[in-house]
Image: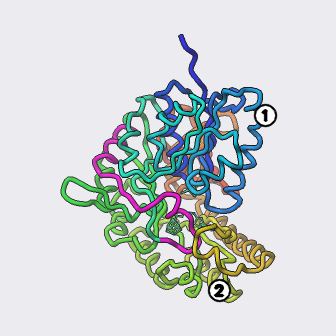
C-alpha cells in the first residue's frame, strides 16, 4: 500500500479563505493527500493568504522564510501559495522566494490537482487566471464524512464596488453568484453530515442574485428556501454592503426563525466627506436610517461592523463623526483597522494621515467599541438564549458554543449536547465570553 501524502494548510484572512482551504484539502484528497497539523510532517505546505492590509501580506513572506530549513532538509517537499497574495503578487512571490513550487489564485482552485502534478514533476506551476468556467462546478465532489455542527458555504464571490482602499475587487474578481440549486444541494449535503448552522459567505453576500428555477433569486429568497431544509436550524450571512440591504432581506430578519439575529454591516467611517472619498456611495445618515429599519424588523438584532481610521485626509472632525455614528448605532462587536495603502488601489496615491495621529484615533475608537461590546454582553446576564454547542470547553464537563447573537457561551453540559442547540440562562459576562447554565436540551 502506498502511504498517504501529507498536506499542511495554513489559512489567513477572511472566512472565505477558511471555506476555500477546506475545498482545496478535498481537491488534493483526490491526489492522495491527507491533512496534517504539523508542517514538519508535510509533503506539501500550502499557505492560503490574505492581501487586505500590508501586514497581512508581509506575514506570508516571513512564514515562507521559516519553511526554508524544512525544504532544505526535504527537497521533495512542495510549497504552494494560494489566496489573495497569490493573485496579487504571484510572479513576485516566485522571484522573491525561489523555493515556492506552486502559486494559485482564488479563481483557479479547481486546477490545483493539475498544478500539484506539475510541481511534483519538478516544474514551477503558476495559475492566476480568471477562467470563465465555474470553479465550484469542479470542486463539488465532497467526501461524505461527518463534520462539526457549523459550516461556511460560499454563495457569492468577488466585488464590483471598488471602495478606494480595497484590493478585493482585484484579487477576487468581478461579482459572481452561484446558482441557487447548487447552493441548496451543498446545504442539504452539509446537513446530512451533521451541520446545524450554515453561514452563507460572499464579499458582497447581500448582492447575491443566483439563477433559480423561476428567474434570479436574491439572498432573501435563498434564505427562505434554505430555512425549509429539515435539520438546518440556523442561518447567518456575511459580509454585507449597506447599499444592497433590500426590503425583502430586512423583512426576512423579522419572519424567518432560522435567520439569526446578528448582522455584520460595515460602514467604514461616520464622515460623509470620507465616505465619499472612499467611494462608499452612501452617507452616514442613510446608514443610520437603514439600521432603524432593520431594528424595526428584528428589534433584538445585534450589529457588527468594520471601521478604517486614518484614511487619507481624515481630520479630527471626520473622526469625531465616526465616534458619533458608533454612539448612535451601539455595536455588539466590531473590527477596526488603521488604513493601510494597497498598491493598485485609487487611495494608495493619496497623502497619508500622520501615523501617530492615526494610531491614537484607532485606540480611541477601539476603547469606545470595547465599552459598547462589554455593555451589550453584560446586558445578556439573566437572559435565556439558544446555544449551539460546538466543542468541549477548557474546564472538565464544560462545553462551548455560540448563542443566537454569536456570543461565545460556556456551560457545564453533558457531551450528548455537542452539536445540539440547548436553552441556556446566561449567568456571567467576561470580556470575550458569557457563562451560562443549561436549562433544557
Ligand atoms: N467584503 C467586505 C470587506 C472585506 S475586507 C465588505 O465589503 O465589508 C474587511 C475589512 O477590512 C473591510 O471592511 C475594511 O474595514 C478593512 N480594509 C479593507 N481594506 C483596507 C485597507 N486598505 N486598510 C485598512 N483596512 C482595510
Ligand atoms: Fe472591498 Fe468595498 Fe468590495 Fe467590501 S464592498 S470587498 S470593502 S471594495
Ligand atoms: Fe483577505 Fe482576500 Fe479575504 S484579501 S480578506 S483573503 S478576500
Q: Secondary structure at mark 2?
A: helix
Question: Is residue 184 rendered to the left or right of residue 264?
Answer: left
Residue drawn at x 43%, y 48% is 153
Question: Is residue 276 rendered to the left or right of residue 136?
Answer: right
Residue drawn at x 68%, y 89% is 317
Marks 1/2 in contact by CB < 8 Å: the verdict is no
Q: Estimate how packed mark 2 is, as few (under 14), some (14 to 19) or many (20 or more) residues with alpha carbons within 10 Å.
A: many
- Residue to which mark 1 is pinned: 69
Q: Nearer the viewer, residue 213 or 96?
A: 96
- Residue to which mark 2 is pinned: 318
**Residue most extreme to the top:** 1
Q: Which mark is residue 342?
A: none
Residue drawn at x 77%, y 41% is 66
Magenta-tinted stretch: 162-190
Which of label 1 and label 2 is nearer to you?
Answer: 1
The image quarter in which residue 70 lies: top right
> Residue 41 at what x, y percent from top left?
69, 26
Q: Secondary structure at mark 1?
A: helix
- On the question of residue 178 being in view, the answer is yes
Estimate the spatial distance between the alpha carbons at disc 1 and disc 2, rounded to whole Å.
49 Å
Work out whether 167 lies above or below 37.
Answer: below
> Residue 420 at what x, y percent from top left?
47, 39
> Residue 347 at what x, y percent from top left?
61, 76
Amino acid at each position: 500500500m502506498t502511504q498517504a501524502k501529507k498536506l499542511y494548510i495554513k489559512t489567513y484572512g477572511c472566512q472565505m479563505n477558511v471555506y476555500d482551504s477546506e475545498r482545496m484539502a478535498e481537491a488534493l484528497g483526490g491526489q492522495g493527500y491527507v491533512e496534517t497539523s504539523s508542517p514538519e510532517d508535510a509533503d506539501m505546505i500550502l499557505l492560503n493568504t490574505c492581501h487586505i492590509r500590508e501586514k497581512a501580506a508581509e506575514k506570508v513572506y516571513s512564514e515562507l522564510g521559516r519553511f526554508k530549513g524544512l525544504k532544505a532538509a526535504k527537497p521533495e517537499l512542495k510549497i504552494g501559495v494560494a489566496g489573495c497574495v497569490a493573485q496579487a503578487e504571484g510572479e513576485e512571490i516566485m522571484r522573491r522566494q525561489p523555493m515556492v513550487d506552486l502559486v494559485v489564485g482564488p479563481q483557479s482552485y479547481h486546477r490545483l490537482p493539475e498544478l500539484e502534478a506539475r510541481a511534483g514533476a519538478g516544474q514551477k506551476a503558476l495559475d492566476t487566471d480568471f477562467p470563465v468556467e465555474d470553479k465550484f462546478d469542479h470542486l463539488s465532489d465532497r467526501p461524505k464524512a461527518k463534520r462539526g455542527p457549523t459550516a461556511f458555504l460560499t454563495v457569492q464571490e468577488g466585488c464590483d464596488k471598488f471602495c478606494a482602499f480595497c484590493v478585493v475587487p482585484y484579487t477576487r474578481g468581478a461579482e459572481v453568484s452561484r446558482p441557487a440549486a447548487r447552493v441548496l444541494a451543498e446545504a442539504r449535503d452539509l446537513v446530512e453530515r451533521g451541520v446545524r448552522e450554515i453561514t452563507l459567505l460572499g464579499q458582497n453576500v447581500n448582492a447575491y442574485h443566483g439563477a433559480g428555477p423561476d428567474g434570479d433569486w436574491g439572498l432573501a429568497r435563498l434564505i427562505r428556501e434554505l430555512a425549509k431544509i429539515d435539520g438546518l436550524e440556523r442561518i447567518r450571512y456575511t459580509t454585507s454592503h449597506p447599499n444592497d440591504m433590500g426590503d425583502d432581506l430586512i423583512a426576512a430578519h423579522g419572519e424567518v426563525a432560522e435567520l439569526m439575529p446578528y448582522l455584520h454591516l460595515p460602514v467604514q467611517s461616520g464622515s460623509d466627506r470620507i465616505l465619499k472619498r472612499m467611494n462608499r456611495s452612501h452617507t452616514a445618515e442613510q446608514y443610520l436610517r437603514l439600521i432603524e429599519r432593520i431594528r424595526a424588523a428584528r428589534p433584538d438584532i445585534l450589529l457588527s461592523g468594520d471601521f478604517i481610521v486614518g484614511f487619507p485626509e481624515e481630520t479630527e472632525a471626520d473622526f469625531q463623526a465616526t465616534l458619533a455614528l458608533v454612539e448612535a448605532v451601539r455595536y455588539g462587536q466590531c473590527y477596526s483597522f488603521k488604513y493601510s495603502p494597497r498598491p493598485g488601489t485609487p487611495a494608495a496615491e493619496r497623502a497619508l494621515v500622520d501615523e501617530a495621529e492615526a494610531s491614537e484615533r484607532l485606540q480611541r475608537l477601539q476603547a469606545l467599541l470595547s465599552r459598547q461590546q462589554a455593555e451589550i454582553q453584560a446586558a445578556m446576564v439573566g437572559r435565556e438564549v439558544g446555544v449551539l454547542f460546538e466543542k468541549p470547553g477548557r474546564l472538565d464537563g464544560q462545553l462551548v458554543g455560540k448563542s443566537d447573537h454569536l456570543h461565545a457561551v460556556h456551560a457545564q453540559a453533558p457531551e450528548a449536547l455537542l452539536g445540539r442547540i440547548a436553552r441556556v440562562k446566561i449567568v456571567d459576562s467576561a470580556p470575550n465570553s458569557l457563562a451560562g447554565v443549561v436549562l433544557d436540551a
